Image (spheres, helix red, strand yellow):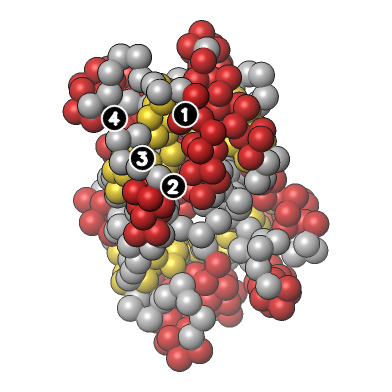
């Protein structure tokens, strides 16, 4: 099978890791011909471009493919994508992310590619957008939906959002959870003693971890607000943040102004393959993002045996199950956030029980090979429906 994937940029992120693993498995397990088209990995989040190349994925870099709307860049990117499709002659074009999804579907449909698929990693519209911007994005997505054969959602919640917005009918969506190499997470605690020693944590310290870009709508300010209550009550609590972004100077200034330098550690950008080691040092993961598809850190944390406190947004409820794997808190509910964190800080047995149940829940559903098997089966079914049968 010849499959062309298109994604806007290969920064460090869940959609990008998902795409790279899918391409690698199609090449090495199914012996498919694969080409990955992407724009430059601009931004402070870090690049996965070399990681993709190291995995043996052929890559076509399109300099004009950018996240921001720019008519000149977008036209050039569309023409470059169209040229790549004509030269590669794929049977399947699979798009990811908003900009690549619009341009890629338009080009593939115009060139009559037999099967065009789009993955919804996270809804491109959200309630925190200005109303005009939200309506524009929804209109673009409706147009693009008419130019593909099927959608993959990384969570049932993504399907609900898209269907409720009138973008496409429910039968066109298939939920396939975003896979990963699960073994390093299941075995991560073998690194725990060494990582905590390196970070200066004592045995009695309870480490509340957060793995997210230091960016708008990720909710780090809410964690700082919760820390105002938690730190005076629990001297053993430490906060460990993994991630980089444009808000780092502001957040560091807020930490310094409160005199919390010894209670917070900002690790910055961490390679995805190194994430299990950092999770091993944590006792609880808190995720306060206000919009996600299904945040990759949630199954990663649960695979690592760590309970999760998450805002109840999008796909979080599909893995964070109250009383079983963690706590779901209404967004921006600080009293609920504080209460959940305090209960976990005080109760080691509860942390272990919730973490173990999380491992059992996620160890099968989030395996990368199961993800790729389901994606490829969808390709095969769609090709058969289009009269282009493949094995």
Residue 379 is labelled as: none
- Identify the residue position indicated by label 3 in the image: 260
Depth check, front residue: 84 or 134: 134
Determine whether, in the image, residue 95 is placed left or right of residue 240.
right
Distance in Å between CA atoms under marks 1 and 2: 25 Å
Of badges 4 and 1, the one in the foreground is: 1
State the image quarter where residue 309 is shown: top right
Distance in Å between CA atoms under marks 4 and 1: 29 Å
Dot 4 or dot 1: first in sequence order is: 1
User: SS of the residue at dot 1?
Assistant: helix
Compared to residue 231, the image places residue 386 above or below, namely below
Determine whether, in the image, residue 103 is placed left or right of residue 156.
left
Compared to residue 150, the image places residue 28 above or below, namely above
Depth check, front residue: 182 or 286: 286
Of badges 3 and 2, the one in the foreground is: 3
Dot 4 or dot 2: first in sequence order is: 2
Determine whether, in the image, residue 197 is placed left or right of residue 90.
left
- Residue at x 44% of width, y 64% of height: 7
- Identify the residue position indicated by label 4 in the image: 277
- Identify the residue position indicated by label 2 in the image: 212
- Identify the residue position indicated by label 1 in the image: 232
User: SS of the residue at dot 2?
Assistant: loop
């Amino acid at each position: 099978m010849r499959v062309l994937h298109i994604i806007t940029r290969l920064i460090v992120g869940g959609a990008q890791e998902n795409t790279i693993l899918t391409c690698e498995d199609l090449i090495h397990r199914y012996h498919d011909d694969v080409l990955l088209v992407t724009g430059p990995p601009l931004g402070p989040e870090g690049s996965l471009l070399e990681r993709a190349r190291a995995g043996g994925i052929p890559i076509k870099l399109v300099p004009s493919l950018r996240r921001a709307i720019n008519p000149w860049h977008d036209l050039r990117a569309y023409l470059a994508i169209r040229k790549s499709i004509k030269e590669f002659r794929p049977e399947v074009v699979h798009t990811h992310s908003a900009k690549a999804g619009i341009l890629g579907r338009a080009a593939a449909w115009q060139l009559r590619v037999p099967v065009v698929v789009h993955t919804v990693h996270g809804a491109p519209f959200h309630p925190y957008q200005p109303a005009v911007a939200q309506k524009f994005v929804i209109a673009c997505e409706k147009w693009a939906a008419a130019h593909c054969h099927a959608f993959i959602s990384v969570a049932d919640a993504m399907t609900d959002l898209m269907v409720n917005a009138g973008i496409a009918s429910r039968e066109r969506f298939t939920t396939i959870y975003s896979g990963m190499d699960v073994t390093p997470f299941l075995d991560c605690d073998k690194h725990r003693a060494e990582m905590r020693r390196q970070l200066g944590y004592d045995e009695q310290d309870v480490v509340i971890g957060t793995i997210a870009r230091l960016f708008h709508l990720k909710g780090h300010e809410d964690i700082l607000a919760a820390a105002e209550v938690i730190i005076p009550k629990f001297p053993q609590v430490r906060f460990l943040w993994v991630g980089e972004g444009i808000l780092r100077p502001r957040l560091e200034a807020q930490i310094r102004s409160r005199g919390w330098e010894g209670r917070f550690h900002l690790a910055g950008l961490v390679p995805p393959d190194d994430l299990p080691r950092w999770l091993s040092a944590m006792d609880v993961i808190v995720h306060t993002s206000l919009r996600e598809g299904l945040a990759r850190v949630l199954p990663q944390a649960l695979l690592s045996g760590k309970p999760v406190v998450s805002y109840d947004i999008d796909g979080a409820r599909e893995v964070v199950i109250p009383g079983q794997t963690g706590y779901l808190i209404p967004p921006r509910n600080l009293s609920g956030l504080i209460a959940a964190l305090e209960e976990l800080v005080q109760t080691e047995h509860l942390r272990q029980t919730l973490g173990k149940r999380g491992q059992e829940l996620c160890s099968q559903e989030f395996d990368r090979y199961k993800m790729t098997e389901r994606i490829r089966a969808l390709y095969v079914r769609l090709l058969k429906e289009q009269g282009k049968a493949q094995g």
